[in-house]
Amino acid sequence: MHLDKIRPGQVVLSTAGRDCGNFYIIYRVINDRYVEVVDGQHRRIENPKKKNVRHLKFLNYRFPDEGKLSNPEIRKFLKSFDEKGEELDG
């Protein structure tokens, strides 16, 4: 995955590990191999999870306003996204 395709605020689905099947928002790009992700509940902004980009499915959704990332807003956004059940390849 190229860095220019990985952006903070992008919605991803974990495809490997204990958290397989969970939706996250990319919080920070570490390098072309690793990102930090948050879900606002188990992985809060204060303690993001480091994930290998090979273990993520990139979706065609973005958090509407990256400047206002907060745990409650992230939870609300991912909950509504999860309920839709929509998965689009990025």
Image (tube, rainbow, N blue to C red):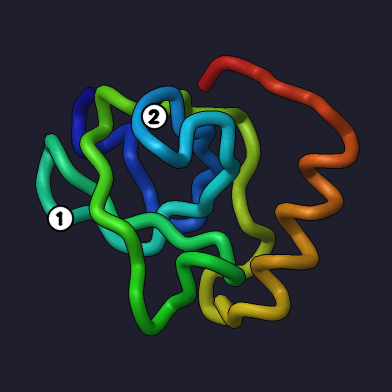
Q: Which residue is rendered at x = 59% and y = 81% of the image?
A: 70
**Number of the label disc, if any, that sits on residue 73:** none
In this rendering, the label closer to the viewer, 1 or 2: 2
Nearest the eye: 76 or 1: 76
Three-letter code for the amino acid on which mark 2 is drawn: Leu
Three-letter code for the amino acid on which mark 1 is drawn: Ile
Q: Distance of mark 1 from mark 2, alpha carbons?
A: 15 Å
Identify whether 32 is placed above or below 80: above
| Residue 47 x/y as whole percent | 34, 76
Q: Which residue is rendered at x = 35% and y = 32% of the image?
A: 17
In the drawing, does residue 46 fall left or right of residue 89? left
| Residue 69 x/y as whole percent | 56, 76
Q: Which of marks 2 and 1 precedes in the sequence?
A: 1
Residue lying furthest top in this view? Answer: 89
Q: Which residue is rendered at x = 44% and y = 77% of the image?
A: 45
| Residue 36 x/y as whole percent | 30, 57
| Residue 21 x/y as whole percent | 57, 31
Helix, strand or loop at mark 1: loop
Identify whether 51 is placed above or below 15: below
Query: Which residue is label 2 attached to?
Result: 56
Identify whether 69 is placed above or below 88: below
In the drawing, does residue 8 fall left or right of residue 52? right
Do the CB atoms of the residues marked 1 and 2 lie less than 8 Å apart?
A: no
Query: Which residue is label 1 attached to?
Result: 30
